[in-house]
Image: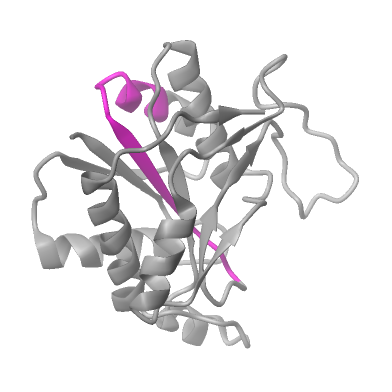
Amino acid sequence: MKVLITAFEPYDVWQQNSSWEALVELLHRRGAMSGVSTRRYPCDLGQLVERLNKDLSAGYDAVLHLGQAPGASRIQLEAIALNVAGMTEASGDFFGPLVPRGPVAYRTSFPLNDWYRTLRQHSIPCSVSYHAGTYLCNAILYLTQYWFEQHNLNRPVGFMHIPLTSEQTIQSMRDLPSMSKQQAADAIGLVLDQIMHTSCTEPEFA
């Protein structure tokens, strides 16, 4: 079983990215994990696509993407990726599709309900989300599934949104919810364990 786990670099006003901080924390605990590769991606769509396609060409049985979610108070398990390239903050603007004439959306084939129950059993706040935004987090989830479809490969792809770390909230001087990177790492580890030991159903294409 070969699994790719990705996270993002810092962007905008954030000097850290909680997705990467949590992944690094998990790696500190577990060290090198057999069959698991990790990547930190740039927050630029063009560079992201180039790096992603190169990595996927190496051959993986499953992919788990991680991203930061300022304002979130819990882990968000994303169910849907849309064929939209834009930012929700740019109200009224139209950025067009990620893939012209591509499927409208993809739905993850990972068992999110099982992940949800497992995280809750370990007292980790979480929820299943049906909207990963319309920019990089959504894009990487959509483009990964599109890549596998184009290569006639049936591989599960998932995305977890991670709240800001406690340190980020303090540094921002804003009243924002947070989660310790230790607890976020716990969540990633629990999900990874399920991926490594659970078979997945065929992905659904919208």
In the shown orientation, is residue 186 left or right of residue 90?
left
Residue 27, image x, y percentages: 17, 60
Quadrant holding the C terminus: top right
- Residue lying at the far right in this picture: please name it: 92
Give the residue drawn at x 40%, y 22%. 154
Residue 30 visible in this rendered orientation of the protein:
yes
Give the residue drawn at x 37%, y 80%. 180
Quadrant holding the N terminus: top left
In the shown orientation, is residue 203 left or right of residue 181?
right
Give the residue drawn at x 57%, y 60%. 128
Give the residue drawn at x 62%, y 85%. 174
Q: In the rendered structure, which segment of residues is drawn in magenta? A: 51-70
Residue 105, image x, y percentages: 66, 32
Q: Nearer the viewer, residue 179 or 78?
A: 78
Assess whether residue 64 is covered by the magenta stretch.
yes
In the shown orientation, is residue 154 left or right of residue 1?
right
